[in-house]
Image: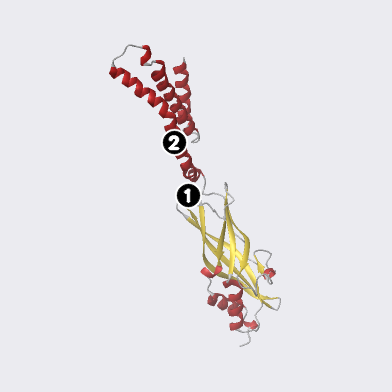
Amino acid sequence: MFLKYWGKVLKRAWKDTRHDFRLETNARIGVAIFIWLIVLLIGFVSSPKNFDLSNEAKNTFKWLSALGISFPIWFIGRIFVSCANIDNDLVLKINEVNPALEFTLIKIDPFDVFEHDDGLFLRVQLKFKIRNVGRVTAYHWQLTARSFISANENIYPARVADYRFADFPVRPSPSMMIYDRTILLGCSFIEAQDFGCQLRPKAHTIEAVREEIEAMLAATTINYQLATETSPGELGPTPLSLVLDVDVLVAAAREKCPGFFHI
């Protein structure tokens, strides 16, 4: 009855590992304990002291007894080794069932420039490449700006209010189209994030606007967070200087607001 019971328990445990990987360790522990009990039963209950056996048989029973004593030591060592690798195993299992996305800022496109508050308001679109580096399809995700900082002491924190991620000054905007944002395995998606800043150049000249754009954007770092259905994501610092092209933004300002400049 004892062997039959243990056989059913272990068989059920091994089958359950197909549905829950965490039960695999329990099943292995059960098998190890079962083998240990068998070794002890043979090594101690069938001790050579109780039987008239040959020297060869006595040596065999001695080895079995030593094995029964040393097995717990080996088993404890295996537990420590398994614990050392548990983090890597969990990461692999999690990546198999959860989407894994990475984002990279690839471009800053001028969206609009117009006169506002005795200066110019510059609105751009930050283009991000969202890559699916996991093993499952990403259906729902969201890239969000959480905070920002500028290394320019003349700008931050005195002019924090001049940065906008929403609630831009009143200006007609094109209607947004609804599209599929699903990212398949190994594929990518280009995400556009609106961003703007109030430019306050010291003069109505191209050089003054150029200096103002560099002061507002070149030293600015935005912390973005990419959330999925199963994870809030980690904050990723994104320096705008990596893809900042001041000449393109200055050209957009000159094209959109020619009357602002005194040449």
For the C terminus, the quadrant is: bottom right
Q: Amino acid at mark 1?
A: Gly
Please state the horizontal and vertical placement of residue 252, each as a whole percent of the image: 57, 76
Label 1 environment density (alpha carbons within 10 Å; few <14, some 14–19, many ≥20) = some
In this rendering, the answer to whether 84 lies above or below 71 is below
Element marked by disc 1:
loop
Q: Which residue is mark 2?
A: 77
Q: Earlier in the sequence, mark 1 or mark 2?
A: 2
x 57%, y 78%: residue: 250
x 32%, y 21%: residue: 60
In this rendering, the answer to whether 65 lies above or below 78 is above
Please state the horizontal and vertical placement of residue 132, each as a whole percent of the image: 48, 53
Q: Which residue is mark 1?
A: 134
- Residue 259's tag is none
Q: Give the image quarter of residue 156.
A: bottom right
Q: Amino acid at mark 2?
A: Gly
Instruction: Please name whichever residue, 251 or 2, is drawn nearer the observer in this view of the structure.
Output: 2
Q: Are marks 1 and 2 in contact (CB under 8 Å)?
A: no
Please state the horizontal and vertical placement of residue 55, each as a whole percent of the image: 29, 17
Element marked by disc 2:
helix
How many numbered discs sit on the rendered protein? 2
Outermost residue on the bottom side: it is 263
Is residue 77 at all visible to an observer of this figure?
yes
